[in-house]
Amino acid sequence: MNPKVSLNIHTPVLLREVVEALAVQPGGRYIDCTLGSGGHASAILEHSLPGGQLLSIDADPEAIELARVKLEAYRGSSLLVNQNFINLKTICTKYNFFPVHGILFDLGMSSVQLSGSRGFSFQRDAPLDMRYNPSDEVTAADIVNNSSEDELAHLLKTYGEEGYSHQIARYIVKERPIETTLKLVRTIEQAIGKRRGRIHPATKTFQALRIAVNHELENLSSVLKQAVELLGFEGRLVVISYHSLEDRIVKQFLRKESRDCICPPGTPTCVCGHKACLKLISKRVVVPSREEVRLNRRARSARLRVAQRIINHNEYFQSFARYSFSTGITNYHEHFKLIFSTLNIN
Ligand SMILES: C[S@@+](CC[C@H](N)C(=O)[O-])C[C@H]1O[C@@H](n2cnc3c(N)ncnc32)[C@H](O)[C@@H]1O
């Protein structure tokens, strides 16, 4: 793919709100866990001048190459890593990139991926692939062609919240092998009819397959904890989700980690010993304005949540020293300098 052709296809969602939620400031250190076309990344870099640094991650090697062109002007301050964000802590340890002032997740797929030929869209014919990282093992075609009818129905119900999961699964099994997007769309239409309300009949099946292929919900559940541990004092965690399954995971995580006690209601005295490590910056979810949705249809389902790391200074030094010890990092001087830089920032 020629990077210049699709450079501007993806419009970053809630751009101003992301910069505000991260409280981006000159000299700050940030992580963008879902680089995509680099729209949010370039805004973060611009607002963190002079002296800011950004570590960006994407599982898709094509996204990394596209964004590299876009972020060329910030070459000295920007580090791009082609990895799955499930390895966030390992990546940050490798590059000595912690503690940080803010971490962003803009979940799901980009418009570049949707308009490409890797099978993310039900509107154009392509091999049924859907992997963010083409070197991952399992494709959507593997799942569609090798799962039992019950497994397919369960997957469509769980990851797509598809009410017609059994009908669709039955037709898929009947029509196999299914190797392309349009054959899958035709199969779904045979199973449940061409149009149901405002959404295309294949929407939920495609969402379910994409989530399953890329382990999206498991990855999200596991990375949020890692992200919090990498945040410095008052560092910000910002997550944009695009469907209720991922938003629920984010909401429940933030709710739990912003409470001091998570004992069941009615427990006379606390026995869990849980301590809050986050403070919710806004209790209400941030959604795009009508104007943004008018200009960018993709923004319509976006929901942004933001929280801030809370920790007392002693606890912070102790946990950091423990972490440095367990990861084998010995350059304490540099790291304590960094801790101070995050502690002193307003
Ligand atoms: C919505 S797009 C991000 C768009 C970006 N914020 C921008 O402004 O251009 C999401 C990106 O996250 C990547 N992604 C999704 N899950 C990932 C994971 N587990 N690890 C790394 N990257 C992931 C996708 O490949 C995609 O490029």
Image: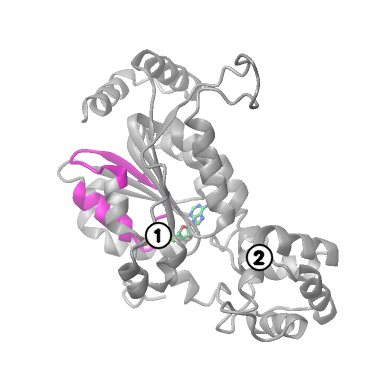
Residue receiving disc 2: 209
Answer whether residue 247 is magenta in the image.
no
CA gap between label 2 and label 1 equals 23 Å
Q: Quadrant of the C terminus?
A: top left
Q: Nearer the viewer, mark 2 or mark 1?
A: 2
As drawn, 106 above or below 153 = above
Q: Is residue 9 visible?
A: no
Residue receiving disc 1: 64
Answer whether residue 33 is magenta in the image.
yes
The span shown in magenta is 21-47
Foreground of the two, 238 or 271 = 271
Amino acid tagged 2: Leu
Where is residue 153? Give x, y as percent.
78, 65
Name the residue located 60 percent from the left edge and 16 percent from the top edge: 270
Residue 173's tag is none
Foreground of the two, 94 or 34 = 34
Where is residue 340? Give x, y as percent.
25, 22
Name the residue located 77 percent from the left edge and 81 percent from the top edge: 191
As drawn, 184 above or below 293 = below
**Of helix, strand and loop, which one carries label 2?**
helix
Amino acid tagged 1: Ile
Label 2 crowding class (10 Å Cα cut-off): few <14, some 14-19, many 20+? many
Q: Is residue 16 visible?
A: yes
Q: Quadrant of the N terminus?
A: bottom left
Where is residue 308? Give x, y as percent.
37, 34
Colour mapping used in the image: one colour
Q: Is residue 290 left or right of residue 337?
A: right
Whereabouts is ligand 1, in terms of quadrant? bottom left
